Amino acid sequence: MDEVIDWLNFYNHKRLHSTLSYVSPMTFEQRWNAAQQHDRKSA
């Protein structure tokens, strides 16, 4: 079970994804959320 959790953490936090401009899913989501908040403040 620990191996699965370790793999999920690697996949979501460290593995670079070509479809996400070579960032991890967590980094992509953080950047997306920041952009959404910035857009709301600008509107």
Image (spheres, rainbow, N blue to C red):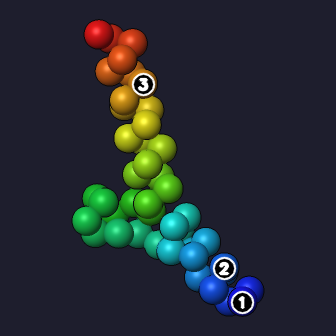
In the shown orientation, is residue 37 left or right of residue 1? left
Where is residue 35 shown, x and y percent of the image? 37, 31
Across and down, in percent, residue 13 comes to 55, 64
Residue 32, x across and y down, in percent: 38, 41
| Residue at the front extreme of this rendering | 1
Q: Which labelled disc corresponds to residue 23?
A: none
Q: Nearer the viewer, residue 28 or 40?
A: 40
Residue plotted at (25% across, 65% down): 19
**In the rendering, at what x and y percent does residue 5 appear?**
66, 79
Q: How far is mark 2 from mark 3, CA to CA?
A: 30 Å
Q: Residue at x 39, y 21 (%)?
A: 38
User: How far apart in space, not on screen, are marks 3 and 1 (Cα)?
Assistant: 37 Å
The part of the image, by quadrant, that contains residue 6 is bottom right
- Residue ID for mark 3: 37
Vertical placement of residue 6 versus 30, above or below: below
Quadrant containing the C terminus is top left
Q: In which quarter of the image is residue 36?
A: top left
Residue drawn at x 34%, y 63% is 22
Mark whose residue sits in front, 3 or 1: 1
Residue 5's disc is 2
- Which residue has dot 1 on it? 1
The foreground one among 14 and 9 is 9
